Each structure stands twice: as C-alpha cells, then as structure tokens.
Amino acid sequence: MYKITTGAHTYTIELDGDQAKIDGDPVHLDLITLGHRQYHLLLDKRSYNIEIVSHEATSGQAVIKVNNKTISLEVSTELDELLKKMGLDKQAESKSQDIEAPMPGLILDINVAEGQEVQKGDKLLILEAMKMENVIKSPGSGKVKKIMVKQGESVELGQKLVLFE
C-alpha cells in the first residue's frame, strides 16, 4: 500500500502484480520501463510518460514529470503510516540530540551509562510498547550526559529518556 499526496489530494494505491486499486477502485496497469527512472503507463486507456526526477526515501518527498508536467509528491508506505501512528516518526524529525520516548511504554533495559561515548546507531535502551520491544538507537555520535529513566519505569510519549552533551 502506498499513500501519495500531491497538493490537497491524497490517493491510496494498492498493487498486486498488474492489478491495482486506486482509492479502493480496481484498475488495470500496463507499466513499461523505458530507461533509468523513465516509464510508460497505460491506465484506463490513457497513455502517460513518467520520469522520476528526484526521490528522497527518508522523507518520502518526490518530484516526477508526467507527460512533461512537473509534480511534487509525498510518498509513504504502509510501514511509514504505521510508524506515524505509533509516534516513531517524531523521533526522526527531532532537531535535538536528546532522546524522547516515541510512544508510551515500559523501559525494559538500558544499554548505556552516563559519561559513555556512543556512535550513531548504538543501542541506547529497549522500550516495550504494544507488546513489542523497540530498540532505541543513538541518532548520532556523542557523549551521554544524563539518563532520565530507570529500568522497569513507565514512560509517556515525548518524555526525555537520554540527554547528550
């Protein structure tokens, strides 16, 4: 499932082979790759030449040309939508080095100590939420200034967990 937003319009697209549903309505797609990032699409007896000008996977922002008309889009997948629903997308958008709880939950384990140097991607702690264990990783390199929670403690969405120097 893909969610495509352009301007004020949002479309839901489900793909299954050459069968698809756009906003729940079945359509037949005939898509041919012409070259790198270039495609030809037949949809409901209409012809479209499509070129992907740019696509930023982390933000979902894309620019495409459809029959030489430039269109800006935001593309999200089913996983992106689930992460938004769970509040996990807010962590990625945060400008601060401090780690906040991406959702309410229970601290199962703390894998760092105050004063410890960490690298981007190092496991900081494990947060249990919705019966799932979520590994909270360091967004960058730095030194742990203060750990604001204890193992076994319940936390709320947005609560500070780890502070960096």
Image (cartoon, helix red, strand yellow):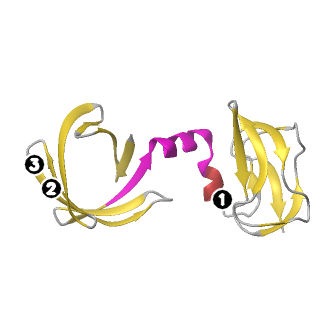
C-alpha distance separating marks 3 and 1: 43 Å
Q: Indicate left or right for 17 with 5 as reference.
A: left
Residue 106: x %, y % from top left: 80, 36
C-alpha distance separating marks 1 and 2: 39 Å
Q: Nearer the viewer, mark 3 or mark 1?
A: 3
Q: Residues within 10 Å of mark 2 (few under 14, many from 20)?
A: some
Q: Which residue is mark 1?
A: 94
Amino acid carrying label 2: it is Tyr
Q: Residues within 10 Å of mark 3 (few under 14, many from 20)?
A: few
Amino acid carrying label 3: it is Arg
For marks 1 and 2 on the same chain, the one whose residue lies earlier in the sequence: 2
Q: Indicate left or right for 107 with 45 as reference.
A: right
For marks 3 and 1 on the same chain, the one whose residue lies earlier in the sequence: 3
Q: Which residues are magenta?
A: 72-89
Residue in the image at 79% along x and 69% along y: 142
Amino acid carrying label 1: it is Ser
Q: Secondary structure at mark 1?
A: loop
Q: Quadrant of residue 25?
A: top left
Q: Let me know if residue 86 is in the magenta part.
A: yes
Q: Secondary structure at mark 2?
A: strand
Residue 125: x %, y % from top left: 79, 49
Instruction: Classify the position of the N terminus by image quarter.
Output: top left
* Image height of 101 relative to 113, above or below: above
Q: Which residue is mark 2?
A: 48
* Image height of 3 relative to 73, above or below: above
Residue in the image at 61% along x and 39% along y: 86
Residue 31 vs residue 43, the one in the foreground: 31
Q: Which residue is mark 3?
A: 46
Q: Quadrant of residue 124?
A: bottom right
Q: Residues within 10 Å of mark 1 (few under 14, many from 20)?
A: few
